[in-house]
Amino acid sequence: MLSLNNLTVGYDRHPVIHHLNMTVEPGQMIALIGPNGGGKSTLLKTIIDQVKPMDGSITNSFRKIGYISQLYSTNRDFPVSVGFFVSSALFRQVGLFGRISKDAVRNALKTVHLEGFQNKYLSTLSGGQFQRVQFARLYLQQPELLLLDEPFSAVDQKTTAELIELLKEWNSRGKTVIAVMHDLNLVKDHFPYTVALAREIVASGKTSDILTEETILKTFSLDMAVNPNAGVCQRKDEHEHCEQEKTEN
Amino acid sequence: MFEVLIAPFYEYEFMLQALLACALVSLSAPLLGLFLILKKISLTGDAISHAILPGVAVGYAVAGLSVTAMTVGGFIAGSIVIVLSGLVSRITRNGEDSSLAVFYMVSLALGVLIISLNGSNIDLLSILFGSLLAINEECLYLLSAIAAITVVTMTVIRRPFLMDCVDPDFLRQNGINGHIYHMIFMILVVLNLISGFQTIGTLMAVGILILPAAISRLWFNSLLFCCILSPLVASFACYSGIILSFHFNYPTSPVIIITLGLVYMISVLCGTNGGLLWKIYHLKHLDS
């Protein structure tokens, strides 16, 4: 189980997410929707401990978390092979010298329909192929909780359909999935749960209840960009930024 | 032919020692240069190479032209600059480029000043431009140790180090601190720049790291092939430099770097991985 308690996160003391409370049960498949700058990526980064919360806490009982960041955060020009990239899922396990099973890597690539790609360079892959490679690495890593940041935003329909099927299959075998999504049709068709995030949780629950015109309008109409004039969070006990923003709005 | 190209190394011990010294530097330095290029931090290498100078100068001021003193001084100074440039880039975010340029000009000035105050112009020249034909045994031991440490360490850390270059977030999220491997790499860079300074001098030391690596990248995309080709290219250039300076009394280090420059130009034209002729040929192929 993952629970976020009164979580406030920000950059340079300007909060991006306010006082968030949320619980994720094992086996859930959740779509995270919301406008740009609404704090979706920041939330995922906070869960994997890349960004420290300003206030509040996270309790996590999932044993291993797998994370796929937005496409552009990887240096794909670096001349390493697909096989090496996928095998990095096992680095922690095998250490500096341990043997990495070629069969395991080959098998992981097979699950994403990229048989025989292990010796190709990352730089030769298309966006969709690279996303498949990231899924192969996730498969090899065997995490209990999967965090995906816009996994289908630069990917064609066929790849999206295949990767979503893969996600659903993993989910049916007990993996928990949280994915940042922009395509609301995909959310409607494949994700049982939805959380609408616009610096705070606007709505959360069963997708059919959330994806109403009213909620969508409310979620996406707020001015979500980080306001440079917003107050600086100076003390933990007094949330001055909240007060100031209310008056500004 | 034999008389001109090979005999000098039989007849004179200093020639053989110079060749050996070069071979040792060529073995490890281009490997690091390859990653400096791939990580797009060649300028950092340049800055560190000049930053070594004040350390070397202090070593020189304390103990004269002693290999040990100058090496220790250079290593300390180089390490300080790595830490400082890391801090500055983290604090100011985009300021790394300009701050490095500042570091390196100031260090160069400081080093030249300290040496000038304490010794002759000849010493200054030998530190700035190296004295390959006057390498002693102590120095050869140092170069062997640095080459061995570099090759062994890079082999050991290759997995996390490469992954830190490609996808540092993933490593961190898997509980592996990629930054440590980056720091180990930077320390190896300092050590190899010290090797470079002992052989071809501080001003051009970074050339023996970067140029052979840049050349190999123009021929191969494969890291393995680049790791094989770049030491060969570096060794060839060093050999040319030594033999030309022997016969024509040219200064050694500039000839080495110019040779590398010529090979680079040829590679830009003919290289199989992005060379000009290759591209033109492929364009024609498409047109027809």
Image (tube, coloured by chain):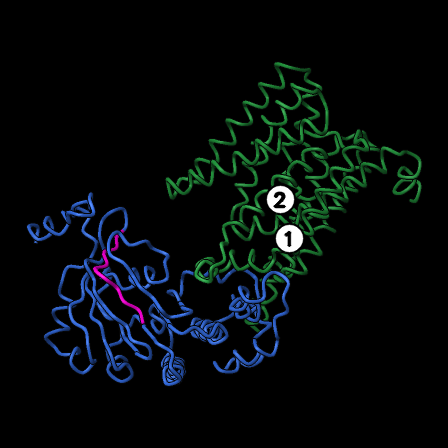
Q: From what the image shows, is residue A56 above or below residue B124?
A: below
Element under disc 2: helix
Chain A colour is blue
The residue located at (16%, 77%) in the rendering is: A210
The residues bearing labels 2 and 1 have C-alpha atoms spaced at a distance of 9 Å
Up/down of A165 relative to B48, above or below: below
Chain of the residue under the numbered disc 2 shown in the image? B
Where residue B200 appears, as percent x and y from the top left, is 70, 34
Other residues around mark 2 within 10 Å, as few (<14) / some (14–19) / many (≥20): many
Query: Residue B111: x percent and y percent?
Result: 58, 23
Q: x and y percent of residue B229 in the render?
A: 71, 55
Q: Which residue is mark 1?
A: B154
The boundaries of the magenta stretch are A1-10
Q: Is residue B215 magenta?
A: no
Residue at 78% across, 38% down: B141
Q: Which residue is mark 2?
A: B188
Identify the residue at horizontal 19%, vertical 44% (top origin). A235
Q: Colour of chain B?
A: green
Q: Amino acid at mark 2?
A: Leu
Closer to the camera, B190 or B98?
Answer: B190
Q: What secondary structure is marked by label 1?
A: helix
Chain bearing tag 1 is: B
Q: Quadrant of residue A223?
A: bottom left
The image quadrant that residue B17 belongs to is top right
Is mark 2 in CB contact (under 8 Å) with mark 1?
A: yes
Q: Is residue B204 above or below residue A148?
A: above
Q: In the rendered image, which quarter contains the C terminus of chain A?
A: bottom left
